[in-house]
Image (tube, rainbow, N blue to C red):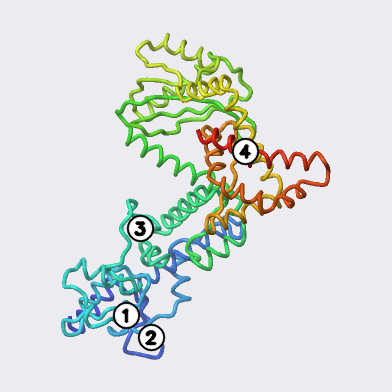
Amino acid sequence: MPTQKNGITFLWKNYFFQNGSYYKTDRSHKAAWCNACLSGHMAIQREMDARRTRGGEIVQMRSDEELREHVLANSEPICGKIERMVAHARKCYYISPDAQTSILLAFRPQEQIQAPSPRPPSDQLSSSPSAQQIDTVATRFQVSPSTNPRPVKRTRSLHSLAQGGIKHLVRSLAPSQLQEEFSADLCKLFISTNTAWYAAENPSLHRFVHKWVGSEVVVQDRRILSGRVLDNEVKKVEEALAKKVRGKEATGQCDGWKNVAKSSVISTMMSVENEQYLIQTHDVTREAKTGEQLLKHVLEDKKLMEEKYGVVLIGWCTDNGPDGKKMRRLLQDLFSWLIVILCWAHQINLVVGDFLVIRCTVTEDINRALEVIKWFNNHGTALALLQTEQALTFQGSFWALILPAITRWTAHYLAITRYLKIKPALQICWARNEYKLITCAGTKQDLQEKARVIQDYVRDEGLWGRLQK
């Protein structure tokens, strides 16, 4: 343990501040302020100023000197005794683990390092500096070193520094970096959970963050999250993608459809080593659906792939629509070395369609099964009876009847597979509840006749056999 003089000099020089005043009525010891506490409180005040500036409450933020004076005036000093300052360092939430370990090592009593909080005698600090630091942090936040979560790839994020929560982050990151990390993670949270940007304006979210995270960070305006913050995250993803695929061979592909807003769009992807990456989406609602116009977008996206991501484009694939067919011919004329092919997934789908036209009985059987599915889905009482019967038949489990969408490939296969799966429950349901199922269709004769047709389909073993094939 250092001498009294060396010890007090060590603390004043590195970890504590004094302005020359004495501690209260004590005329022998100076008033001391922890440098880490001062920096932490200044960071909080700085963020509060930034928030008030954005809200128009103040014109400009205070300077560092003004913030320091404010914190000193509103912070209670401690007595400048060695034991008081060491005791403060042991429990200070703003001081770094390295600084805390250095103080504890310098003032350890009889070669024993007193941990920041009580610990069992068998769990003493190691003589290795790195182990001391890990053990100190783990003790402080009541986390066992053996149960630490495995490290993640991103070393400077809210997740990788999560051992001590926001208090640990405040002293590990600068205030601006802390706010930037929080906003970036909040932006990704909104996207991954499909949350509207307007949630950033919800007072409940602000209260939640203030209560459980603290005033060190704020929920920024939705226009900032969906603007600058989102742009930065997109830039990071694009840079990571460029680093991953640069110099590798790629195949381009494009397809068009209507989005939920009924706008016609064409999206381009590239396939690199069996992985697909979305490159760009074009709104072509007001454009002519011609091969020349599609070629214009393909050339633009080809240039983007080669220049921005550095891939070697060796082929291009589209469906066999009129615009795609002409575009492939024009593209082949421009780049004779390029492999230009049509999408065989589309072709197989068309082949299946042609097969169903020839084998009309298959289409009829599928339509009968779909009529049963639609009838049950459209009658709540019948659906409830079927679910109850499934729970009895399948030991508590029941499955929904799938109504396929024409644009979803394999949807019809999945719908019929599910229909076949619940065959026992479906037939038993009709046997037990025939009167209820017919009357729940309605009081009109035609509605009850339709219910009896559905009953015939359910009881038709020939239909079940053909669907099974």
The nearer-to-camera label among 4 and 3 is: 4
Q: Is residue 445 above or below residue 429?
A: above
**SS at circle 1:** loop
Q: Is residue 335 above or below residue 221?
A: above
Residue 367 in the image, given as x and y percentages of width and height: 63, 32
Q: Earlier in the sequence, mark 4 or mark 3?
A: 3
**SS at circle 4:** loop
- Which corner quadrant of the image does residue 321 belong to? top right
The nearer-to-camera label among 4 and 1 is: 4
Numbered marks: total: 4
Q: Earlier in the sequence, mark 4 or mark 2?
A: 2
Residue 381 in the image, given as x and y percentages of width and height: 71, 52
Q: Earlier in the sequence, mark 3 or mark 1?
A: 1
Label 4 with label 3: CB-CB less than 8 Å: no
Crowdedness of circle 1 by 10 Å Cα count: few (<14), some, many (20+)?
few
Is residue 460 visible to us here?
yes
Where does label 2 land, which residue? 23
Say which mark, if any, is on residue 117: 1
Say which mark, if any, is on residue 460: 4
**SS at circle 2:** loop
Cα separation, mark 1 vs mark 2, equals: 27 Å
Q: Earlier in the sequence, mark 1 or mark 2?
A: 2
Type of the residue with mark 2: Tyr
Say which mark, if any, is on residue 424: none
Q: Earlier in the sequence, mark 2 or mark 3?
A: 2
The nearer-to-camera label among 1 and 2 is: 1
Horizontal relation, residue 343 to residue 419: left or right: left
Cα separation, mark 4 vs mark 1, equals: 75 Å
